[in-house]
Image (cartoon, rainbow, N blue to C red):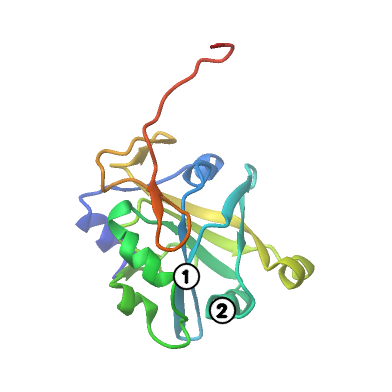
Amino acid sequence: MSFDSINAGAAGRLVPVELAKAYRLLNHGPVTLVTSAHAGRRNVMAASWAMPLDFQPPKVAVVIDSRTLTRELVEASGEFALNIPARVQAAATLESGSRSGREQDKFAAAGLTTFAAKEIAAPLVAGCLGWLECRVIPEPANAARHDLFIAEVVAAWADSAAFSNGRWHFPDRECRSMHYLAGGAFFATGEAFQVEPGASE
């Protein structure tokens, strides 16, 4: 499935996110799906330990265990994507974080469909709320010692039904990002509220 066809199928809801504001896709700490690909192999894994690091150029950090297929593919390709799943994808997210990609096609096992990214070879997961295409900034010591990967965001996208003009605005219960606790327990992102600068309680 191509990038353009998935966008057309979503009634034009897939919109680019200005790279200077790409950090806002992750700033509230949602669980992510890390996708990777190299030499005809691909994988998906769930990761809660992903975060924005910088604005210009935009950077992210993610922890990828050394024993995983994702780690092998990311080290070989120097790329990965962070996909931000919606609440409706909770079961698929749990499945993606519960098994090894060495044992089976985790996309098929979790019922996930994908489409091609614009700037990297790793696939993007359809139905998500946001996507960040990332290229690894080589830091071998960090990866070896801490399983930590730092990457530059080279493209970012969002479902305009949930994110536009640099802001989240979740339209309904199922179209919310999630935060993973443990043992299959999640929180859905809650209601937004505004505090004016200088205001005190």
Q: Is residue 132 left or right of residue 189?
A: right
The mark found on residue 68 in the picture is 2
Q: Which residue is mark 1?
A: 45
The mark found on residue 32 in the picture is none
Residue 134, compared with residue 53, is above or below; it is below
* Furthest-bottom residue in this view: 103
Residue 117 visible in this rendered orientation of the protein: yes
Residue drawn at point x = 37 percent, y = 83 percent: 105
Measuring from the top left, give residue 6's x and y in whole percent: 27, 61
The quarter holding residue 62 reads: bottom right
* Furthest-right residue in this view: 141
Q: Secondary structure at mark 2?
A: loop
Label 2 Cα crowd, 10 Å radius (few <14 / some 14-19 / many 20+):
some
Q: Is residue 131 left or right of residue 27?
A: left
Q: Nearer the viewer, residue 192 or 119?
A: 192
Residue 118, compared with residue 11, is above or below; it is below
The quarter holding residue 9 reads: bottom left
Residue drawn at point x = 34 percent, y = 35 percent: 169
Measuring from the top left, give residue 152's x and y in whole percent: 61, 56
First-in-chain label (2 vs 1)? 1
Q: Secondary structure at mark 1?
A: strand
Q: Nearer the viewer, residue 15 or 178?
A: 178
Residue drawn at point x = 28 percent, y = 42 percent: 161
Q: Are marks 2 and 1 in contact (CB under 8 Å)?
A: yes
Q: Is residue 48 left or right of residue 125?
A: right
The quarter holding residue 104 reads: bottom left
Amino acid type, callout 1: Met
Measuring from the top left, give residue 193's x and y in whole percent: 41, 25
Residue 58 visible in this rendered orientation of the protein: no
Which part of the image, by quadrant, shows the N terminus? bottom left
Label 1 Cα crowd, 10 Å radius (few <14 / some 14-19 / many 20+):
many
